Image (cartoon, grey):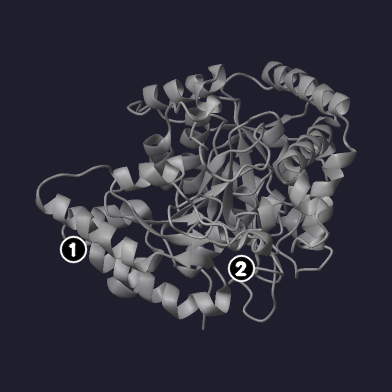
Amino acid sequence: MNDWIAMHYLSAQELANKMAQQELSSVEITRHFLNRIAEYNGKYCIYTSVFEEQALALAENADRLRKAGIILSPFHGVPVSIKEHFDYKGSVAHYGSNARLNCVSEKNSAVVDKLIALGMVILGKTSMTEFAFGLAGQNPTVGTAHNPWDLKTLRSPGGSSAGAGAALALGLCPISLGGDTGGSVRAPAAHTYTIGFKPSSGMISRADAMPLSPTLDVVGIVSRTVEDSEIMTRLLSGPDLNDDATLSTFGLEAQRNFMADSNDESTASKKLYCLNEAAWPYSVNADYSVYWHETIGGLKEQGYEIIDWQPSDLGFFKQIGDDNSVVLAYEAYQHYGDLVEDPTADVWLTVRNRILNGKNISIADYEKTLEDRKAYQEAFRKELPENAVLLLPAMDQAAQTLDFEDVKHTGLGAFLRPANFIDAPAITLPSGFDSEHMPLSIQLIAHTANDHVLLSVAKEVETALGNTRQVPNLN
């Protein structure tokens, strides 16, 4: 395939290598992505804002610095997209809601400033579920990102970072930043055959990004390769006085572990703990069941030791997923309760009701759930061996057609939310399709602050799976 045609499906690291070898400039790469966005965005509703003028200026600066021998980071000159919920000074910050169409960001989110300082090129902001409250990615008011794996019907793109996964699948960016409060980076990745990584809390600053549930909110990454997620995490992680999570004990521990491991050449363990089906929080459909067993068999053929594991309480993962929803709803109401209580506010009824559910949660129940969270975190630390990586489903089924009540994808949250509640770093890896040729993924999680362990193992698993770079046929 011609390199130019394939450029939009290269990874961030591959594009960085092209620039290092002087095969391409940042301006050439940026123009190519902007042209592709112009071609596809109207039909697929991926970007809410495109920063063409700013992006080209950043690309020109990156090229000038490179000519002067100044390289700001491994991703110097590489384009990136950001979820709608990140503030970008001077741009509309509607958070996926018609109720905020007149809101304009007065400053940049911390990650936006950092991306620019790294020499990266911000292409634009990608679409999301209204106020990030929904894993199917549906947004019937501002617009739903189209999952490009089905060109005939509107299927779930995954949410809430809906545009992030679809942008990579369509070749509209090489890497994207999103937010993950209950699976919102991993869901779009799982539904679009891309990779979704949720770091431990406190790895990457959330300052001046849209809050949904401060206890659970994490900045995450959608990428083509695990290596891209690892590099981006290293570039963005660090303490920030404007985000207390980055200054917390576990946040600082995760950062130290990650940086200390950056030069470690040790081979990742080929041992995976596999969550016993009796402890799954939700039943999977027939297609996913076949895929799951074939994937386990394939990993064994690649020399992996698959160790059956289950918590002492078989209801553990269902309970912590449900508790995640309690914390999320309560805290979301604190932020957006006044807005959704206003009957004249233009908010999608489904999201309005989700936020209103938080009104019915007492502060006593909320505080008890937070105390229970500590107990569940401790239980997980005690029962899953140190430095172990746990393999479990990422979903119960592939992306389905969207329904207005948004209930078809309930099982997606059942498998993704638990990692948020116990603050486990988690990553989804694609490796197959269902009978309708819709993407399927697996999920790996590790102990809090063991992001370095998780990504080290995930890179090896990615290689073993062998088919994680497929893209949809847009013809």
Instruction: Establish if 159 lies above or below 305.
Output: below
Residue 451 seen in the current view? yes
Instruction: Establish if 360 lies above or below 22.
Output: above
Toward the viewer: 385 or 152? 152
Toward the viewer: 129 or 113? 113
Q: Which mark is residue 155?
A: none
Task: Give amino acid for label 1.
Answer: Glu
Mark closer to the observer (1, 2): 2
303 left or right of 307? left
Mark 2 surroundings within 10 Å by alpha-carbon count, few (fewer than 14), some (14 through 19), many (20 or more): many
Residue at the spot x=43%, y=57% of the render?
90
263 left or right of 181? left
Q: Quadrant of the N terminus?
A: bottom left
Residue 119's x, y, as percent?
28, 48
Residue 153's x, y, as percent?
70, 78
Task: Give amino acid for label 2.
Answer: Ala
Residue at the spot x=74%, y=56% of the render?
288
- Whole-angstrom CA distance, mark 1 to mark 2, is 33 Å
* Pointer 1 or 2: first along the chain: 1
Toward the viewer: 313 or 425? 425
The quarter of the picture where residue 388 lies is: top right
List the single residue furthest toward the left.
68
Q: Which residue is mark 2?
A: 145
Instruction: Establish if 219 lies above or below 407.
Output: above
Q: Which mark is residue 23?
A: 1
Residue at the spot x=49%, y=69% of the render?
170
